[in-house]
Amino acid sequence: MPYSTQRRPGSANRSPRAYQSRPSTRRPSKSKFSKQYINPSRFVKAAQPAADVVEYIPQHAFADFALHPLLKQNIADKGYVTPSPIQDQTISQGLTGKDIIGIANTGTGKTAAFMLPTLHRLLEEPHARALIIAPTRELAQQIEEEARSLAKGSGLFRAVLIGGSSMGEQLRDLKSLPSIVIGTPGRIKDHLERGSLDLSTFNIVTLDEVDRMLDMGFIADIRFILDSLAHERQSFFFSATLDPKIRELINTFLSDPVVVSVKTGETSDSVEQDVVRYNASHEKIGKLHDILTQEHVGKTLVFDETQRSVERLAKELQERGFKVDSIHGGKTQGQRTRALKQFKESKLTVLVATDVAARGIDVADITHVINYTTPQTYEDYVHRIGRAGRAGRTGYALTFIDQ
């Protein structure tokens, strides 16, 4: 999947390093863990009016950053002038080559915060190569889309390594020795073990949503991958939290990192949060129907607990006349991509999902997130409702509570 059709010089003479096969460390099923009790009061919070939020005064404009001219032009073509707080504080530090730990709420523009310094270095240093690791397929694809947009006309190659998509296509892309590899931990590890990916020359690495990857049980895969990279490298670690597990990983792999924290609270200030109480299952679907038919309810993301319950709920809503589809780990990557594309294009008004979609769905005009079942953890709740209230809009989050 090249940004251009020009092959990198000397790519035919290089061969991938063979890796010894290691025991699989696949993500554990969430069903093995008991659900965390969350007091319903934590699902209730008024959105903070914009006038009450302390306005952030950026120290830079995008034009001020010492970025490659092509990147500056692409940024200007997208109409970007003023960086978000995480971009404002990260890009300038990243351009100096420092390791960065970014702590930020979801939906704050962190992809461009690590992508712009990465692309700048790839354009300035022909031998530099970058690896970007994300917890879900959807987030990996979202990062690739942003990279493609910012790198337009650069001639940089990239490969996306995710499960559920063609292995043959991935092998073809890797043979072109891409400048950027974006993927999920399990599939990246698969390529390392089969010798189709050699990371020994990769000197830039980004771990996006580190907290989520550790929650999903990817710690062993991540350690294996990071051990395979060039010893001298620049690292970007982005997370919504900085708990002991993440600190341990940071202490092992980062060198004197700069910490940039713009996290403003547990949940987004732009999301109005409330609960919906019900007494019986037949009453529950009726209440959801009534919510979805309200005039102010637009594009809606509905979360349910299991693949089976998601399919059942989507079918029920479809029979009631809603434009709806579902997305979960049991669907093929093609099905997931099509559903998400139709949702973005407003061909669907409702998308029913498991938590696989809590990270990686970047749809600016979602008005409502509905938790038809409560999440496994409060952290999952935070990331679910972070899909609403983006791009300066007020979003709404409703959580169903069994009385």
Image (cartoon, helix red, strand yellow):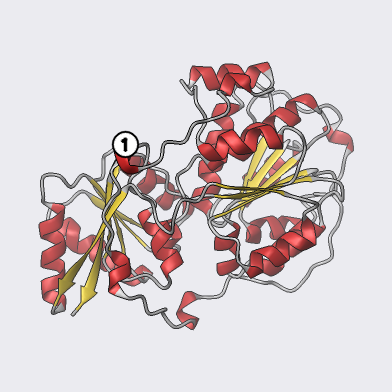
Residue 263 visible in image:
yes
Identify the residue at horizontal 53%, vertical 56% (top origin). 240
The residue beneath circle 1 is 345
Seen from the viewer's position, the closer of residues 77 and 171 is: 77
Quadrant of the snapshot with the N terminus: top right
On the image, the x and y values in percent for residue 137 come to 53, 53
Label 1 SS: loop
- Characterize the local packing of mark 1: few (<14), some (14-19) or many (20 or more) Cα atoms within 10 angstroms: few
**Residue type at the position of mark 1:** Glu
Relative to 310, residue 38 above or below: below
On the image, the x and y values in percent for residue 295 come to 10, 45
Identify the residue at horizontal 71%, vertical 60% (top origin). 189
Quadrant of the snapshot with the C terminus: bottom left
Residue 330 visible in image:
no
Identify the residue at horizontal 13%, vertical 79% (top origin). 279
On the image, the x and y values in percent for residue 239 come to 57, 55
Seen from the viewer's position, the closer of residues 382 and 290 is: 382
Identify the residue at horizontal 33%, vertical 45% (top origin). 389
Asked if residue 400 lies left or right of residue 250, the reply is left
